[in-house]
Image (spheres, rainbow, N blue to C red):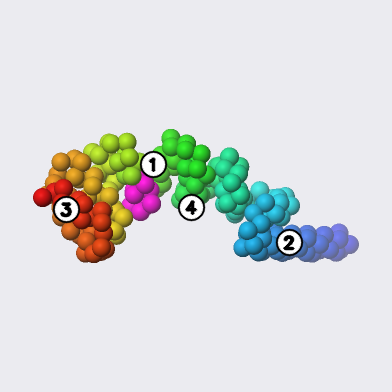
């Protein structure tokens, strides 16, 4: 009976300590948001580094704050940890792309977009930016696979439609390009890019 009493006491102490620790973590996250809103990114990072437990949420948040602070390598490191903890997380991979793009590490950017598309083939950002990457290096055929998918899913999205239009133009598919430039004009009647495209198609 005495043993049971001691066991219950230790159990209650453990529950109390766990609850206190969780409350402290929430408070530290809250402080970090306040510091972020004040533009104090390094202070926000330092606040979160007081947390001893390693978690997806913590690494994701540290990745974002490091990116805002211009600490791009640190940002990549934290986002990579978040991806390891939750491999199917799309948000962590999209987060990783931010510092990687700042560092012009395009292979790493492409790797993350490809991983996202394996999980979510219709993801807007991954399709658009993967298409844009191929477009920028003149690989229009490869770009069309991504851009056509986006235009099918978001036919009234100006950015996707105008980029797909120019991609088709450079592939010498002028009729398809013209159709897309007209569609772009329906979305943004004052589009100078669409006007230029239409002139080149005539």
User: Circle 2 — which element?
Assistant: helix
Q: Quadrant of residue 132?
A: top left
Between 147 and 199, the one nearer to me in the picture: 199
User: Does label 2 or label 3 sit earlier along the sequence?
Assistant: 2
Q: Is residue 30 above or below residue 139?
A: below
What's the CA distance linking mark 1 and mark 3? 33 Å
Q: Is residue 113 left or right of residue 85?
A: left
Q: Residues within 10 Å of mark 1 (few under 14, many from 20)?
A: some
User: Does label 1 or label 3 sit earlier along the sequence?
Assistant: 1
Q: Is residue 119 magenta?
A: no
What's the CA distance linking mark 1 and mark 4? 14 Å
Q: Is residue 59 above or below residue 156?
A: above
Q: Is residue 124 magenta?
A: yes
What's the CA distance linking mark 2 and mark 3? 60 Å
Residue 114 numbered tag = 1
Quarter containing the N terminus: bottom right
Q: Is residue 84 left or right of residue 129?
A: right
Q: Residue at x 78, y 60 (%)?
A: 17
Residue 91 numbered tag = 4
Residue at the spot of label 3: 198
- Residue 19 horizontal/vertical position (percent): 73, 63
User: Circle 3 — which element?
Assistant: helix
Q: Residue at x 57, y 48 (%)?
A: 67
């Amino acid at each position: 009976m005495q043993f049971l009493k001691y066991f219950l006491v230790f159990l209650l102490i453990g529950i109390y300590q766990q609850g206190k620790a969780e409350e402290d973590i929430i408070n530290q996250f809250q402080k970090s948001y306040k510091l972020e809103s004040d533009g104090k990114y390094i202070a926000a990072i330092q606040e979160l580094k007081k947390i001893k437990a390693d978690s997806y949420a913590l690494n994701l948040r540290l990745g974002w704050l490091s990116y805002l602070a211009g600490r791009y390598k640190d940002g990549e490191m934290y986002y990579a940890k978040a991806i390891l903890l939750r491999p199917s997380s799309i948000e962590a991979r999209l987060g990783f792309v931010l510092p990687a793009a700042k560092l012009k590490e395009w292979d790493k950017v492409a790797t993350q977009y490809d991983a996202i598309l394996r999980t979510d083939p219709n993801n807007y950002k991954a399709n658009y930016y993967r298409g844009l990457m191929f477009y920028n290096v003149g690989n229009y055929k490869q770009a069309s696979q991504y851009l056509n998918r986006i235009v099918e899913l978001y036919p009234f999205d100006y950015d996707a439609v105008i980029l797909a239009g120019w991609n088709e133009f450079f592939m010498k598919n002028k009729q398809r390009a013209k159709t897309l430039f007209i569609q772009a004009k329906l979305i943004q009647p004052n589009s100078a890019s669409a006007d230029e495209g239409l002139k080149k198609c005539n």
